[in-house]
Image (tube, grey):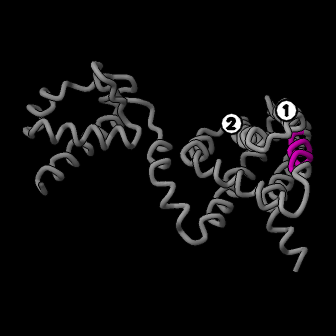
Amino acid sequence: MENQEKNSQMIVDDVISQIGSGRLKIAEALPSEREMAQLYHVSRSCVREAMQVLALLGIVRIRPKEKTRVTAFQIEPFIQRISPLLFAQQGCEQDIAQFRLAVEIKAAELAAEKGEDAGLMELVSAMRQYEDEAQAAKLDLQFHKALVHNSHNALLKIALDSVGSLMEYSVAHNRRQISTHSSLAILIDQHEQLTRAIAARQTETAAELMKRHLQLEENREETEK
């Protein structure tokens, strides 16, 4: 069993290495299970185990009766599987909040530099029309994803996309906390103010508004002390 795990890890490492060096391209098909077993001098069960690990990591796509292909790397499928463990950790909410501050304040600043407000006001308008909290939360999440996308910074987009399920959890958690003490209309107003600052290319204002928006619950707690 130990040798099988070692051999499977060898295949995983080699496939990742080949993708990194450019020898394997996105959408390129991998050799068949039988061919890979011969290539690496391992059993076919080792190859299957390695492919399952790569699929879990979002590096390859496995479909019945089709060749296994390299796919654009996505860590979100992996994060979704381990998210219950992350949520169970003490201080999870604070960790996510700090992550969002780091990513989204910079995203707001970059979007404002370009005046890139595509799709944001439409989402704000949609938020005002929905009384259903589940739908409103989805629009809230879409707004933050759209804003980071408007930053046109590939690494910020990857950072946010990689924790999609944690973002969904964070948005829902914040909305629940705020609704307990004040109106959720405050959030919509903040989304609109932020959008207008971005459209007007007010970089510093956009960054500060995003900071206030993400720290709204924290600021409420400080005020009540």
Tell me the element at label 2.
Answer: helix
Residue 23 appears left or right of 163:
left
Amino acid at circle 1: Ala
The answer to whether residue 110 is seen in the rendering is no
Q: Residue at x 21, y 42 (%)?
A: 11
Is 191 magenta? The answer is: yes
Q: Is residue 49 left or right of residue 55?
A: left
Which residue appears farthest toward the top when viewing the image? 65
* Residue 217 part of the magenta segment: no
Q: Which of the 4 quarters of the picture holds residue 194?
A: top right
- Secondary structure mostly taken by the magenta-highlighted segment of the chain: helix
Q: Which quadrant is the C terminus positioned in?
A: bottom right
In the image, what residue occupies the spot 50% across and 43% down? 76
Q: With respect to residue 67, does 110 lie above or below?
A: below
Q: Which residue is mark 2?
A: 149
What x and y, as percent, mark residue 157? Answer: 61, 41
In this view, the mark in front (2 or 1): 1
**Residue receiving disc 1:** 126
Image coordinates of residue 168 in percent, x first then y, are 65, 48
Position of residue 212 measured from the top left corner of the image (x, y, whole percent): 84, 59
> What SS does tag 1 mark?
helix
Asked which quadrant contains residue 116, the reply is top right
> Which segment did they paint magenta?
187-195
3D distance between C-alphas at marks 2 and 1: 19 Å
Q: Residue type at mark 2?
A: His
Residue 215, placed above or below residue 155: below
Q: Among all residues in the image, which is located at the extreme front? A: 132
